């Protein structure tokens, strides 16, 4: 039996075992996807052991950076974001990718009905997930990304890493100077909204009315932020579809076949 593991801390809340095992069953593979709670110091050794036994896996918070350093063949996405969420063995080497990027791009295309090429985007957050979003937006040639983050240094680092001739980045620490501005898309890549009672990532009195909103956070009953945009008639999605799509992209790295996305989506809905 092939082991596909999720390495993180904590991992108990993760939906990945549910939909990855549904995918494994749908295709009749002899494998199991198992969540393993571990310390940072254990991650490189676990990645080596699992891949040498023919397995692979995912990595989640807070171990994506250490995984990026532990793999032997990192994709450009891993190198630029500094985060690896998927590993596997190929031709005797440990490969690592960051499938949050295609996960975001695919989920965003479902929301917008097109790519964000040429769009003006407000990106809230500058942590690991925001770096994956910034990479994706630059890859898709958004025209202008305004980064809003509590820590300006982190926002500056993100802007410096991802700006290209086609995609310009600017940074802000407070939403006050953005009051009344128009955006095609607003993305919440902070962890705000995860817990009931969290502050809103962008308060409604900023009078920013985007054409669409994407929340990377997900909760069983959607997030308050998503519900608030929808109440204003603005199309909005939470991070559940991105989670599924990053999982589908990871499945394809491990198995070399298209992921049974309908079986995965049905497992989450259950
Ligand atoms: P991270 O690296 O720890 O970054 C957290 C971000 O949230 C930073 O920008 C941080 O600002 C900001 N933040 C945290 N608490 C805040 C507060 N009280 N006020 C203002 N800003 C605050 O985490 P991450 O890996 O980027 O993950 C962020 C979120 O994305 C998490 O909720 C995660 O579950 C979600 N996510 C979802 C998916 C998916 O597939 N849907 C994938 C990846 C991540 P500072 O820089 O100022 O600290």
Image (tube, rainbow, N blue to C red):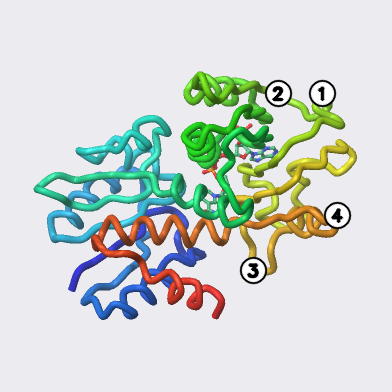
Q: Secondary structure at mark 3?
A: loop
Q: Position of residue 204 (x, y in %)?
A: 86, 44
The reply to whether discs 2 and 4 touch (Cβ–Cβ < 8 Å) is no
Q: Camera-side residue: 73 or 48? A: 73
Comes first in the chain, label 2 or label 4: 2
In space, the residues marked 2 and 4 are separated at their CA atoms by 25 Å
Which residue occupies 85% across, 54% down? 232
Q: Which residue is mark 2?
A: 172
Which residue occupies 77% across, 41% down? 202
Image position of 186 (left or right of 5)? right
Q: Secondary structure at mark 2?
A: strand
Q: Which residue is mark 3?
A: 220
Which residue occupies 64% across, 21% down? 170
Q: Nearer the viewer, mark 2 or mark 4?
A: 4
Comes first in the chain, label 4 or label 3: 3
Q: Quadrant of the C terminus?
A: bottom right
In space, the residues marked 2 and 3 are separated at their CA atoms by 31 Å
In space, the residues marked 1 and 3 are separated at their CA atoms by 34 Å
Q: Which residue is mark 4?
A: 232
In space, the residues marked 1 and 2 are separated at their CA atoms by 8 Å
The quarter of the image that holds ligand 1 is top right
Query: Residue 66: which quarter of the image?
Result: top left
Comes first in the chain, label 1 or label 3: 1
In space, the residues marked 4 and 1 are separated at their CA atoms by 22 Å
């Amino acid at each position: 039996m092939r082991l596909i593991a999720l390495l993180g801390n904590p991992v108990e809340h993760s939906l990945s075992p549910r939909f990855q095992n549904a995918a494994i069953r749908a295709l009749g593979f002899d494998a199991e996807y198992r969540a393993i709670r571990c310390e940072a110091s254990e991650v490189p050794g676990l990645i080596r052991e699992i891949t040498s036994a023919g397995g692979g896996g995912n990595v989640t918070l807070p171990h994506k950076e250490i995984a990026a350093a532990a793999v032997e063949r990192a994709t450009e996405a891993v190198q630029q974001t500094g985060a690896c969420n998927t590993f596997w063995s190929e031709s005797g080497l440990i490969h690592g990718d960051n499938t949050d990027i295609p996960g975001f791009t695919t989920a965003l295309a479902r929301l917008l009905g097109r790519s964000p090429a040429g769009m003006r985007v407000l990106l809230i957050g500058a942590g690991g997930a925001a770096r994956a979003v910034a990479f994706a937006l630059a890859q898709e040639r958004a025209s202008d990304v305004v980064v809003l983050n509590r820590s300006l240094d982190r926002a500056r680092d993100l802007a410096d890493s991802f700006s290209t001739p086609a995609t310009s980045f600017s940074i802000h620490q407070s939403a006050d100077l953005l009051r009344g501005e128009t955006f095609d898309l607003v993305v919440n890549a902070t962890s705000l909204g995860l817990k009931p009672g969290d502050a809103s990532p962008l308060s409604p009195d900023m009078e920013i009315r985007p054409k669409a909103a994407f929340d990377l956070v997900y909760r069983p009953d959607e997030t308050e932020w998503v519900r608030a945009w929808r109440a204003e008639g603005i199309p909005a999605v939470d991070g559940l579809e991105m989670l599924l799509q990053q999982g589908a992209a990871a499945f394809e790295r491990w198995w070399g076949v298209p992921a049974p996305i309908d079986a995965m989506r049905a497992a989450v809905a259950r």
